[in-house]
Image (cartoon, grey):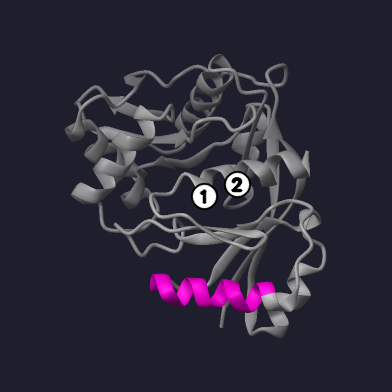
Amino acid sequence: MDARVQQCVVATLSARPAAVEVGPFVVGVDPTTASPHINYATPRPGSAITAADVTALIAAFRSAGRKPRLEYVASCAPGLEALLTAAGFVVAARHTYLVCLPDTLRTPPTPAGVELVEPRTDDQRAALIGAQNEAFGEKPVATAADVARLRRQQEAGAVAVMAVAGSGACAGGGGAPPPADAVSEVAGIAVREPYRRRGLAGAITAETTRQLFDAGAEVAWLEAGGAESWRVYQRVGYRPAGERLYVAAD
């Protein structure tokens, strides 16, 4: 499972608008944003990696005007952490990722007064992105580039789910990139404060995952941001599977 999830990350970064191949690494560069959550690198699973490869990777980040940062499944590059720390990188986090299969998915009821829909207009996309930003403690706005990015992803087969309250306000949402070799990451699961503790996060996660499976995915995976979200994901059928590292230049 580790190799399949890692290859999924490789495919996601390779689809960035200005992706760069650097030896065993793929650097997912998006010129429209400097966000480290979008601009980062990952190794191809099972690749032999040297200190020279890491030096070339740092140079590629500098050339792109981005901070060197990697995310990867630890077991797929067992010697990489030592090479990175020797080059001045620092481990920012170690997260357990969880996976869901079609026969483990559990779909809870959607809370009363909320509808789960696909954003089909740019106004809806902006509302979804703004709600996600707000839920994650950022400014509740979406730039034109943010909206264009989501539209482009949907056109390529990505899943996008928004929760619309009876008032018409966007209560939250989530999404997933197009499956790569039948694997995709569910991400951006967010619920705005006024709509929390009603089971909405679980409903959004389950609906996003269901749509992935309907599109032919065999494995959905995600990471939990804390104990509460961990419980939400487990209730809809996700189970712990492996470890991912987040490493950035100091």
Residue beneath the point at 60% across and 52% down: 226
Residue beneath the point at 67% across and 23% down: 218
Mark 1, other Cα within 10 Å: few <14 / some 14–19 / many ≥20? many
14 left or right of 146 in image: right
- Dominant SS of magenta comes to helix
Question: Which amino acid type corresponds to the residue marked 1 in the rendered image?
Answer: Leu
Pointer 1 with pointer 2, Cβ within 8 A: yes
Element on which disc 2 rests: helix
Which of 188 and 107 lies nearest the eye of the viewer?
188
Chain part drawn in magenta: 53-65
What residue is pinned by disc 1?
13
What residue is pinned by disc 2?
9
- The x and y percentages for residue 169 are 22, 32
Residue beneath the point at 23% across and 38% down: 127
Dividing the picture into quadrants, the one containing residue 151 is: top left
Residue beneath the point at 39% across and 62% down: 35
Q: Quadrant of the C terminus?
A: bottom right
43 left or right of 16 in image: right
- The x and y percentages for residue 234 are 67, 34
- The x and y percentages for residue 200 are 45, 30
Q: Quadrant of the N terminus?
A: top right
Question: Which amino acid type corresponds to the residue marked 2 in the rendered image?
Answer: Val
